Image (cartoon, rainbow, N blue to C red):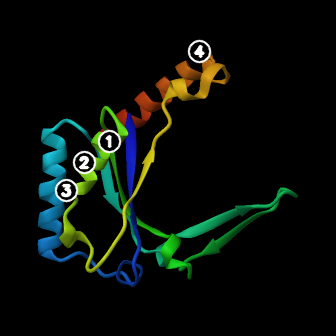
Amino acid sequence: MRFMIIVPASAETEAGALPTEQQLADMTSYNEELLRAGVLVDGQGLHPTSRGARVTYATDGEVTVTDGPFAEAKELIAGFTIIDVSSKEEALEWLRTWPRSSVPGEFQLELRQVFADEDFGEAFSPELQEREARMREEATRHAAQG
């Protein structure tokens, strides 16, 4: 089961503040622990929304692009980690050991399960599964080439 750990943005991350050397060291150690356990899939920090955009698709077909920053910081994401574990309980155990230094003060992390192919039932036909598998393989090759 794959889970995404969502790290919410803060006023500091939205202002473009970079992590301290200690925060980077603590997160690197944590990620190395996930890797040694064989559960780390991916994890990245995100630039502030001032460097991003939102795309709105209206029902009339109009597409609107709005450049950041975005005001509602409590709904923004600063980073993510994806882990592959045997259960939600195991994922929560990993979250309990998240480095407290990664975010100053009190913070929350959000845990969300990633859909697996079998979760989509019959609508995800063998043909669509094959196309999806080819696409993932190609994306992996592309990412490896950098």
Mark 4 vs 2, N-terminal side: 2
In-image side of 100 versus 43 (left or right)? left
| Residue type for callout 2 | Glu
Dots 3, 1 in contact, CB < 8 A: no
User: Crowding at label 2, few (<14), some or many (≥20) Cα neighbours within 10 Å?
Assistant: few
Which residue position is annotated with label 1?
Answer: 89
Q: Quadrant of residue 46?
A: bottom left
Identify the element where label 3 is drawn: loop
Can residue 44 be seen in this snapshot?
A: yes
Instruction: State the residue position of label 4.
Output: 126
The residue at the point 39 percent across, 43 percent down is 3
Question: 10 Å neighbourhood of mark 4: few (<14), some, or many (≥20)?
Answer: few
Residue contact between numbered discs 4 and 3, judged by CB atoms under 8 Å: no
Question: Which residue type carries mark 1?
Answer: Glu
Q: Give the residue type that dot 3 points to.
A: Thr
Residue topped by disc 2:
93
Q: What residue type is labelled 4?
A: Pro
Could you give the CA–CA distance between mark 1 and mark 4, rounded to whole angstroms? 31 Å
